[in-house]
């Protein structure tokens, strides 16, 4: 199982915002520079995270983004489920996938399906708050951006 960059960056944005002081706004440029991620790519992610209710965007000259929920209310498994567009580990997970000669009696797809469910179950046990428990260590990595 490999997550897309889109999901990876979505989680990174949430972590970055969780490190900010309550109510403090971040700019997309700031996040892009800290993670060395394309600003244009981040704009799509920010838009979706806003639609999903994870972040709040404030427009205008002094605008920015911040978490819309408390970090303990943001479930990592749900974020991954909402930002990943393809959990089809192998072709036979897809209805239109290539036909496999062993498909009628194959146990591989069931084993992989169970593994995927276990993966998501573990992620469902974590919140954003769990991911930033080492807030001081993480904040030092972004010290110039988080001191404002």
Image (tube, rainbow, N blue to C red):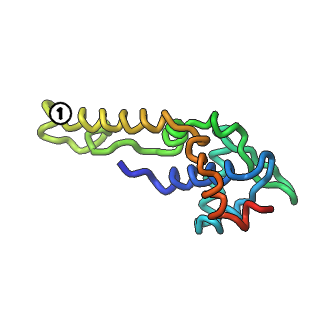
The residue that appears at 78% across and 53% down in the rendered structure is 25
Q: Position of residue 43 (x, y in %)?
A: 66, 57
Near-viewer residue (33 or 18): 18
Looking at the picture, how far across and down is residue 98, in whole percent?
23, 44
Residue at the image point whose x is 64% and y is 66% from the top: 34
Instruction: Return the residue at label 1.
Output: 107
Closer to us: 101 or 77: 77
At mark 1, the secondary structure is: loop
Q: Residue 92, located in which quarter of the rendered image? A: top left
84 left or right of 111?
right
Mark 1 Cα within 10 Å, few/some/many (few <14, many 20+)? few
Taking the spot 36% from the left edge, 34% from the top edge, the residue there is 118
Please name whichever residue, 60 or 111, is drawn nearer the observer in this view of the structure.
111
Choose top left, top right, bottom left or bottom right for residue 141: bottom right
**Residue for point 66% across, 64% down:** 142
Q: Is residue 44 left or right of residue 76?
A: right
**In the drawing, does residue 21 fall left or right of residue 8?**
right
**For the image shown, how many numbered marks are present on the structure?**
1
């Amino acid at each position: 199982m490999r997550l897309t960059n889109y999901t990876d960056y979505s989680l990174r944005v949430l972590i970055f915002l969780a490190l900010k002081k309550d109510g403090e706004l971040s700019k997309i440029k700031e996040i892009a520079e800290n993670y060395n991620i394309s600003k244009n790519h981040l704009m799509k992610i920010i838009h979706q995270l806003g639609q999903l209710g994870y972040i709040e965007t404030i427009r205008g000259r002094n605008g920015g983004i911040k978490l819309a929920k408390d970090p303990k209310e943001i479930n990592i498994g749900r974020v991954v489920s909402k930002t990943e567009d393809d959990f089809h580990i192998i072709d036979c997970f897809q209805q239109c996938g290539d036909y496999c000669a062993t498909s009628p009696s194959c146990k591989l797809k069931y084993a992989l399906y169970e593994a995927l469910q276990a993966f998501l179950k573990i992620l469902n046990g974590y919140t954003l708050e769990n991911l930033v428990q080492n807030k001081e260590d993480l904040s030092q990595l972004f010290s110039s951006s988080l001191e404002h």
